[in-house]
Image (cartoon, coloured by chain):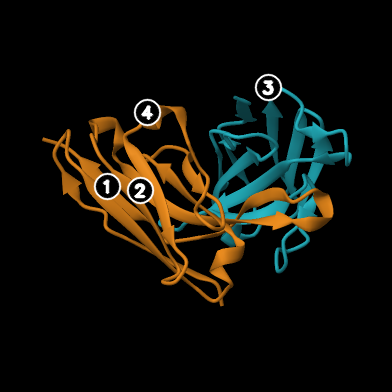
């Protein structure tokens, strides 16, 4: 199985400031045949199911604000929220979907400072 | 609008059984792999099981160990998870989720792009 890790476990950021979450996979999720990274990011607010924000490491889903930016390749990835809004308070998970089983990182909790 | 409605969660004794259901609407159900993902209280997400579009292929997490069975009814746009031999550490919110296929990338299975609201399974004596 591919093991996903995230850092930090939690962070508190002032409104309007930048939040950065890191994700690392135990093996590359870059598929050489198409040069795509099989890495997704989800946002989960309290009492709600996860919401898919980003796929292919950097492609935002329809309707996701452009302050959410995914980057990275291979084994190291980053989710950046460029200007944190109150509604961005949530737990963020990365997930690889290159191989079965699909595996999630442990999550990073983002709060307002 | 895509909608997934999970149901069937309950309090059950260790060793007991439970059948979860997910009713889908707003999309062509038979085009998607359907899945169950669980989340223990206060913890992270764990994939449980997947079933392909026509129900001919099912895949499970190692921890299932033959205890759970995923099935689907394309005529009724529903997917089910039959859980037997439940253990205390199966306590979790169970989410139904769909995964599409990308024809432009060798029919790759995509991420979980729609989720049900979840149904709580509590295993306790």
How far apart marks 1 and 4 lie (CA) works out to: 18 Å
Q: CA distance from mark 1 to mark 3?
A: 31 Å
Colour in which chain B is shown? Answer: orange
Chain of the residue that carries numbered disc 4 in the rendered image: B
Please provide percent x and percent y for residue B104: 83, 55
Mark 3 vs mark 4, foreground winner is 4
Which residue: 42% across, 53% down?
B95
Above/below status of A7 relative to B81: above
Please report, as a chain letter, where disc 1 is located. B
Q: Extreme left residue here?
A: B125
The answer to the question of whether label 1 and label 2 lie on touching residues, with beta carbons closer than 8 A, is yes
Q: CA distance from mark 2 to mark 3?
A: 27 Å
Badge 3 and badge 4 both on one subunit: no
Q: Quadrant of the N terminus of chain B?
A: bottom right
Q: Earlier in the sequence, mark 1 or mark 4?
A: 4
What colour has chain A?
cyan
* Spatial separation of the CA atoms under disc 2 and disc 4: 19 Å
Q: Which residue is mark 3?
A: A26
Residue with the mark numbered 4: B65
- Res A16 seen here: no
* Image spot of residue A12 (x, y percent): 59, 42
Q: CA distance from mark 3 to mark 4?
A: 24 Å
């Amino acid at each position: 199985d591919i093991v996903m890790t995230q850092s930090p476990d939690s962070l508190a950021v002032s409104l309007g400031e930048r939040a950065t979450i890191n994700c690392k996979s135990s093996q590359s999720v870059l598929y050489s045949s198409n040069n795509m990274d099989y890495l997704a990011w989800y946002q989960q607010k309290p009492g709600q199911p996860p919401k898919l924000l980003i796929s292919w490491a950097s492609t935002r889903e329809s309707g996701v604000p452009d302050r959410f930016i995914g980057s990275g390749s291979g084994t190291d990835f980053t989710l950046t929220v460029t200007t944190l809004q109150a509604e961005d308070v949530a737990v963020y998970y990365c997930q690889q979907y290159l191989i079965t089983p699909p595996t999630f990182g442990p999550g990073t909790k983002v709060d307002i400072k | 609008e895509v909608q997934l409605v999970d149901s069937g969660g309950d309090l059950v004794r260790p060793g007991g059984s439970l059948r979860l259901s997910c009713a889908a609407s707003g999309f062509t159900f038979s085009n998607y792999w359907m899945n169950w993902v669980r989340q223990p209280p206060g913890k992270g997400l764990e994939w449980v099981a997947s079933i392909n579009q026509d129900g001919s292929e099912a895949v499970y997490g190692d921890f299932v160990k033959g205890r759970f069975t995923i099935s689907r009814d394309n005529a009724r746009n529903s997917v089910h998870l039959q859980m037997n031999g439940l253990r205390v550490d199966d306590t979790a919110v169970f989410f139904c989720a769909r995964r599409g296929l990308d024809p432009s990338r060798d029919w790759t299975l995509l991420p979980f792009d729609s989720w049900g609201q979840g149904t709580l399974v509590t295993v306790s004596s």
